[in-house]
Image (cartoon, rainbow, N blue to C red):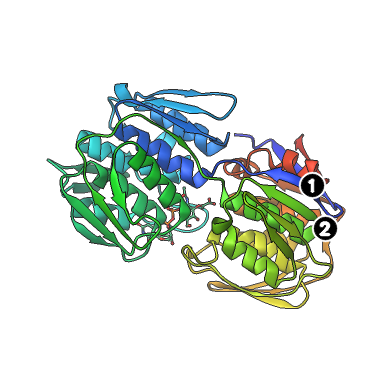
Amino acid sequence: MNKQHCIVVRKSGPLEGRVRIDGAKNSVLPIMAATLLCEQECIIEDVPKLRDVYVMIDLLKTLGAGVEFSEDGVLRVDGSKVDKWSAPYELVRKMRASFLVLGPLLARFKRTMVSMPGGCAIGTRPIDLHLKGFEALGAKINVEHGSVEAVANELVGERIYLDFPSVGATENIIMAASLAKGTTVLENAAEEPEIVDLANFLNSMGADIKGAGTNTITIKGVERLGATTHRVIPDRIEAGTFMVAAAITGGDIMVDNIMLEHVKPVAAKLREIGCTITEFENGIRVQGPDSISNTTIKTLPHPGFPTDMQAQFMALMSVANGTSVITETVFENRFMHATELARMGAEIKIEGRTAVVRGTPKLAGAKVDATDLRAGAALILAGLVSEGETVIGQIHHIERGYVHIENKLSQLGADIRRIQQI
Ligand code: EPU
């Protein structure tokens, strides 16, 4: 853990230039878990060098997979020697997404044991929907001593309705159903682009999945899955974060390597608050306004406004003209950044799932902590427009989801650096 490092940001002028977006964290993690379904080599390209990716590599290796990760972001996973079906607490506790190995291990070995992911900074985040799905496919689930054990003689396709379109549950169930007998129809499924990427990856291995990206996904089980090469989609949240960097500093940034469709909700909001947005085939140019307008934001499952951009927009609204209202409907406790932003002078009132943000013309640098990944990004953004110096601690959270964010921002003209704490 890099607890001894922190990021120092000083008030910076308008950011200008081009930035290239890395492969999507929330795509690559389920895709890496899905390699466990295959007894041959899978090659994944444009894999971001993130802390969470290294945790998943450790987990795959622990299970027996051969893993090679090259300097240019190509990950090779050889699943032929995977011979363990249990994921240990030491790895699962580091990253909630480790729970995504449950579906593939259950499908491959008909039994698995994975530690409970437990609580996390942004809410309790239960796993009931994952488990309901596995049970519907025929697994017996036993939750004991902090672990989930799932056993099945065989997995058989079923009609499954999710009470909430959970991203992780949709992914876990799709993976398990890919090798089940017969057809699974998953209703009220999550529609996030990362689900489509996972389905494309599985289909390229020989799976038969239709409807990914809509709320009904049909998975016809197949006998086995084979070798493939797949390029991960660009990270829409990293892209959104740089788009907000242009907005908050009144800058002009060309964000390269994105899929326009994926950043639509963020682009629409940025237009609303006064940004000029120009779309290109593979990129988007964001020109920040002279003065930022207030707005209303409600996070929703895709294609609604993403919860993973809520914190960054709270930073932006902190310096907007007038009062903004932000409602978080996806997670019940994802406003921890509000307290840290308040240390910098932001005027934010939280009531339940709603934050009322009264824009203030000036923020002031302070010593703050990244309470989670996106909270950390929000603090960096606020630091760019705060008088003096902002020192952000607990940056290991930021490293979970942003590749060298300080380097990318400083190439755009930001006054930002990483230092070692004394
Ligand atoms: N939920 C349940 N029961 C379940 C599963 C989820 O009640 O069995 C609830 C959660 O408690 C939460 C809501 O459903 O309130 C949404 O959770 P979801 O399962 O959709 O989220 P996730 O799969 O745990 C992924 C991303 C998150 C992102 C959310 C929502 C990955 C690895 N993580 O989490 O990403 O916020 O979807 O879009 O894909 C991030 O990147 O910063 C991040 C937190």
Residue 33 or 222: which is nearer the viewer? 222
Q: Point out the image quarter for the C terminus.
A: top right
Residue 295 in the image, given as x and y percentages of width and height: 67, 75
Upstream in sequence: badge 1 or badge 2: 1
Check disc 1 and give the amino acid type.
Answer: Gly
Residue tagged 1 = 17
Rendering quarter of residue 36 = top left
Note whether ligand 1 is within 8 Å of mark 1: no
Q: Is residue 14 left or right of residue 155?
A: right
In percent of width and height, residue 374 lies at 61, 53
- CA gap, disc 1 and disc 2: 21 Å
Please tell me how crowded label 2 is: few (under 14), some (14-19), or many (20+) other residues with Cα within 10 Å. Answer: many
Q: Between 217 and 147, which is closer to the camera in this rendering?
A: 217
Q: Which corner quadrant of the figure contains ligand 1?
A: bottom left
Location of mark 2 (residue): 386
Task: From the viewer's perspective, tell me whether residue 258 is left or right of residue 176.
Answer: right
Q: Amino acid at mark 2?
A: Ser
Q: Image point 74% across, 65% down: which residue?
A: 276
Within 10 Å of disc 1 (Cα), the crowding (few <14, some 14-19, many 20+) is some
Q: Is residue 335 visible?
A: no
